[in-house]
Amino acid sequence: MKSAALLSAVAAATAVHGGPTATLRSKPRATELEPITATGNAFFKGSERFYVRGVDYQPGGASANIDPLADSDVCMPDIEKFKTLGINVIRVYSTDNSLDHDECMNALAEAGVYVMLDANNPKYSINRDDPHGSYNTVYLQSVFATIDAFAKYTNTMAFFSGNEVIHDHLNTTRSAKYVKATDRDMRAYIKARGYRKILVGYSAADVTTNRMQTAAYFNCGSDEERSDFFAFNDYSWCTSNFITSGWDKKVELFTGYGLPIFLSEYGCNLNTRDFGELEALMHSNMTGVYSGGLMYEYTMEANEYGIVEIDGGQNGSKDQTGARKELPEFDAFSSALAAYPAPTGDGGYTSTTTSQACPTADEHWDVDGSTLPDIPEGARKFFEDGAGTGPGLNGDGSQWATDQASTSEGESGTGGSGTSSGGSGGTSSSAAMRGAVPAVDMAPFVISGVVALFTLVGAFAL
Ligand SMILES: *[C@@H]1O[C@H](CO)[C@@H](O)[C@H](O)[C@H]1NC(C)=O
Ligand SMILES: *[C@@H]1O[C@H](CO)[C@@H](O)[C@H](O)[C@H]1NC(C)=O
Ligand SMILES: *[C@@H]1O[C@H](CO)[C@@H](O)[C@H](O)[C@H]1NC(C)=O
């Protein structure tokens, strides 16, 4: 329904070669934060358990596709707000790997804020309509260049290898092995380049029919192939509680999963938002299995999840430097953060990681076995030589590059149908509607009612 309009809006936005301009500045002195590590199914800062208490930060939305960490006129006023809120993590969906991030990353470190980064962006990502073709050298060069751009900051907490590439249509599960191959390659690259161990994992859509298979898949196989954490986007708490949201059932389902879990997006906006999710996330009902979450989202966009409005920044505007206005939800979120602090102690975590058996193919999971595609031949050199200059957000893109992985298992019947496939049909999932954008990595664009309908159905179907 919305798909065609959204698609053309995104196409228009990505066609504009605007973007932030690199400016030479004197380098500020780096502030060091103690890096976050993973042990068992939890995150740690030194010997202290670390809970994600953050926001998703995407000024202008996915269609603006700007890098808010490359322009101090954008990040600085927001970092002041992050300090007021007292959050400790932000997720940033698009960053330009050809630009400098010292100023914003340093200011974030001074504010005690860690960053989780999507290593993909609309032009450089796995295309779920052509996963084999889009897993190529040009793509990996961009992913690795993003790692190069951020590995030096001690407050880079994690990289996402993909966002909601796997959705509720069976055919989207065929992209799983390419996302997981990317996840594997990112971990291998960080190791080969001698960087500290920065965590890598996938941010999943909350799809009832394949939720547990997706989770198992990213935690099966060899240690090189297993993710460092699993995250999913969950909008099922709509002024409800631990039980009516179905979160109690999800805790049961994920008990014993074996890796850290957190919500990479949360925050239903159907009713008056009081962010009661935080009470549950910080409660011993959940802390043995979950490590907090990221509230979607900081800026007010057309989909109405924001807590701060940027003057003139809506509708995909590339200019995100306008005045900041706190919306009523800003106080609500701030109050919830204050009322529900991170618990002391270890939260009942499990100190050892465990792997899962790889899921077998069934009517919801069209992935044949556990074998991952080899890295494309041309990408091997990056492990020794580094990725070189990143293409940024406005290059030619990677989806039609030809240097692909040599194996193509699991791809029977798809034939690279192109970026203009419109959405994945008429089911009620938010994921399906967001599927209109081939390049993935989009946060909910959608009418919230549809999200809620799906997630409620999801909760009942558990
Ligand atoms: C996946 O299935 C949906 C619904 O049947 C369809 O609209 C879409 O084109 C399919 N995508 C691919 C890559 O086959
Ligand atoms: C914890 O779980 C119990 C049920 O097991 C529930 O009654 C209670 O409301 C939950 N507490 C929170 C803070 O979610
Ligand atoms: C965004 O676009 C919509 C539809 O064109 C318009 O109604 C709305 O006023 C715009 N919002 C802003 C803040 O420009």
Image: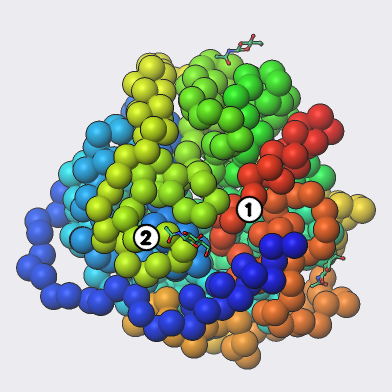
At a point 10% along the width and 65% down the height, the residue shown is 27
Q: Which residue is mark 2?
A: 313
Name the disc covering residue 180, or none: none
At a point 84% along the width and 33% down the height, the residue shown is 461
Determine whether the residue tagged by mark 2 lies in a helix, strand or loop.
loop
Vertical position of residue 14 compared to residue 396: above or below:
above
Q: Is mark 2 within 8 Å of ligand 3?
A: yes
At a point 36% along the width and 80% down the height, the residue shown is 18
Answer with left or right where residue 176 lies relative to residue 331: right
Vertical position of residue 434 compared to residue 341: above or below:
below
Answer with left or right where residue 308 lies relative to residue 76: right
Residue 178 appears in view:
no
Question: Going by the picture, which residue comes out furthest to the bottom?
Answer: 402
Percent across and percent down for residue 129 are 73, 74
Name the disc covering residue 446, or none: 1
At a point 78% along the width and 37% down the height, the residue shown is 458
**What's the amino acid at mark 2?**
Gly
